[in-house]
Image (cartoon, helix red, strand yellow):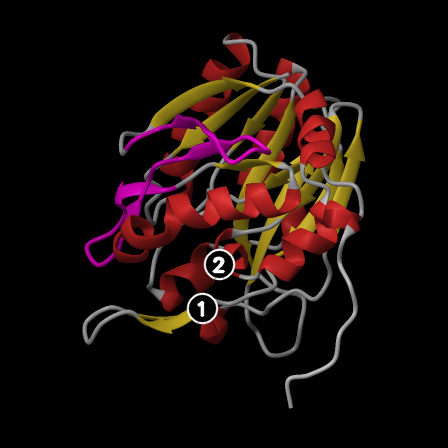
């Protein structure tokens, strides 16, 4: 199977972001990709909460989602929309950070709301409080499709291996990690964490990414990656927006798990106290 990783520099204009995304999705499909993946917050990346509140739509009304469903159907591809920022459905008014897997007929095959919120103080000048604007999800999602079993995660979820283990134990062959990683944490941790999650689970890890200067106050790391079940980096998109194609052989999942069957070796234990 051929996958196409889309790397974007999404900003605060959903219309402009959609135009670039559609171009790259079509390019990936023309290159033979059966599965195309876009990064986290494909539709809008901004720290301006008032702008978000004005620009965001509910899932049923979101123009980006509707357009990308059309692209999946027109190009007969599986399309992982890494995530969209959407108006939430809960009384507290927080938004949803939601990933969508779209089938080649344009229907939504699976949805996943990001579970782990990025609330960190990287430095005195770089702080993030994702939970102030976004409501976390509470359900892991595995989509069983004709092209493989796909586990869905988003960005900061990468630091929580138990989620990846649960997906792998449920049968995932591919785990998606669409992201908008900080340049500081990306340079330190991105490659090693993605490789670790692949090695621990025996899955292919596909991680489309945001890159470059997204807004006056926000930059992202880039380096969209595909990692094999053995932990090999199959492709690294660098820091430019665009499409990276990579060929996957899902038979490698079972081959790797036979070599190191660690998923079968989990044991219950007690402590520490």
Describe residue 256's horizontal placement relative to residue 177 as left or right: right
Name the foreground residue: 141 vs 26. Answer: 141
Residue 22: where, in percent of width, then height? 47, 25
Question: What residue does disc 2 label?
Answer: 156
The relative height of residue 165 versus residue 191 in the rendered view (above or below) is: below
Question: What residue does disc 1 label?
Answer: 130
Q: Is residue 102 visible?
A: no
Identify which residue is drawn at 60% across, 47% down.
200
Residue 16: where, in percent of width, then height? 36, 35
- Per the image, label 1 sits on a secondary structure element best described as helix
Identify which residue is drawn at 26% across, 56% down.
184
Residue 109: where, in percent of width, then height? 76, 37
Residue 112 is one of the magenta-drawn residues: no
Describe residue 63's horizontal placement relative to residue 129 as left or right: right
Describe residue 6's horizontal placement relative to residue 257 as left or right: left
Name the foreground residue: 86 vs 230. Answer: 230
Residue 199: where, in percent of width, then height? 57, 42
Q: Which residues are magenta?
A: 210-238
Within-10-Å neighbours for mark 2: few <14, some 14–19, many 20+: some
Q: Is residue 64 visible?
A: yes
């Amino acid at each position: 199977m051929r996958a196409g990783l889309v790397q974007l520099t999404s900003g605060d204009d959903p219309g402009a972001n959609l135009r670039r995304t559609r171009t790259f999705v079509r390019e990936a499909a023309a290159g033979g990709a059966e599965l195309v993946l876009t990064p986290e917050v494909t539709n809008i990346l901004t720290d301006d909460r008032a702008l978000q509140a004005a620009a965001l739509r509910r899932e049923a009304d979101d123009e980006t989602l509707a357009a990308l469903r059309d692209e999946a159907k027109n190009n007969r591809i599986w399309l992982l929309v890494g995530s969209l920022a959407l108006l939430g459905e809960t009384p507290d008014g927080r938004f949803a950070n939601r990933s969508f897997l779209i089938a080649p007929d344009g229907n939504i095959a699976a949805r996943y709301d990001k579970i782990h919120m990025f609330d960190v103080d990287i430095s005195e000048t770089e702080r993030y409080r994702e939970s102030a604007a976004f409501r976390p999800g509470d359900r892991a999602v595995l989509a069983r499709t004709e092209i493989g079993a796909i586990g869905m995660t988003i960005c900061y979820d990468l630091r929580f291996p138990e989620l990846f283990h649960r997906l792998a134990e449920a049968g995932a062959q591919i785990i998606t990690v669409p992201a908008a990683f900080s340049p500081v944490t990306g340079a330190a941790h991105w490659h090693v964490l993605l490789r670790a999650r692949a090695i621990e689970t025996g899955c292919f890890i596909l991680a489309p990414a945001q890159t470059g200067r997204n807004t006056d106050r926000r930059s992202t790391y880039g380096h969209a990656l595909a990692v094999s079940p053995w932990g090999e980096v199959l492709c690294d998109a660098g820091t430019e927006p665009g499409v990276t194609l990579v060929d996957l052989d899902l038979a490698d999942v079972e081959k790797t798990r036979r070599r190191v069957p660690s998923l079968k070796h989990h044991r219950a234990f007690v402590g520490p106290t």
